[in-house]
Image: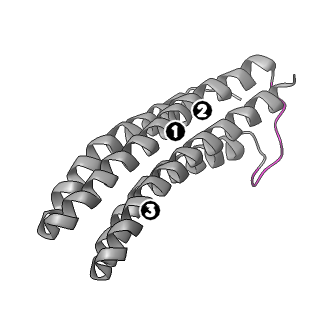
Amino acid sequence: MEGIEIAMLGVALAVGLAGSGSAIGIGIVGQSAAGLISEDPDKFGQTLLLQALPGTQGIYGLLAGFLIMQDIGIVGAEVVELTASQGASYLMASLPIAIAGLSSGIYQGRVLSSSINLIAKRPEELGKGIVYAVMVETYAVFALLATILMLFGIDA
């Protein structure tokens, strides 16, 4: 496998796994929200806000993928020749956001599904439900930061 192919595997993992975590998390929240909306359609705005939150992991993975593609010249420049070792460095740099994006998107969806149950009974507690979800989000942000810092250290 050539270096560029290994680096592009990193792009695929960052975008694909983090995006999958977001899609699963959004789906989990959407299922709970649909149940609540069937009983109380006035809570649509609150539930839509909660459903959107797990989407950030996919955005973080996409950002990491774009940063890698820009660095190796796939986007906006001449494609650089990479050794297998350099390609592996890009692959490794993609893993924090790929793995954390997958798991945090799913678990954030679970937390937000519980928040849907919270606002079903106490709509004024929406903010507390969001705070719980943000605690999960923190680790996706840390993973994105780790990915970006690792990318800065790659000499291609």
Q: Is residue 143 magenta?
A: no
Three-letter code for the amino acid on which mark 2 is drawn: Ser
* Residue at (46, 31) in percent of width and height: 146
Residue contact at pointers 2 and 1, CB within 8 angstroms: no
Left or right for 114, reference 28? left
Q: For the view shown, which residue lies furthest in the top direction?
A: 85
* Mark seen at residue 94: 2
Three-letter code for the amino acid on which mark 3 is drawn: Gly
Q: Is residue 81 magenta?
A: yes
| Mark closest to the chain's N terminus, 3 or 2 | 3
Report whether residue 116 is seen.
yes
Horizontal and vertical percent position of residue 121: 16, 65
- The secondary element bearing badge 2 is classed as helix
Q: Where is 144 relative to 55, above or below?
A: above
* Residue at (39, 58) in percent of width and height: 53
Three-letter code for the amino acid on which mark 1 is drawn: Leu
* Residue at (36, 36) in percent of width and height: 139
Horizontal and vertical percent position of residue 96: 51, 30
Left or right for 153, reference 4? left
Horizontal and vertical percent position of residue 134: 28, 49
How many neighbours does mark 2 have within 10 angstroms: few (below 14), some (14-19), or many (20 or more)? many
**Mark 3 sits on what residue?**
30
Instruction: Examine the residues drawn in magenta and state their main secondary structure.
Output: loop
- The secondary element bearing badge 3 is classed as helix
Count of numbered badges drawn on the protein: 3
**Mark 1 sits on what residue?**
102
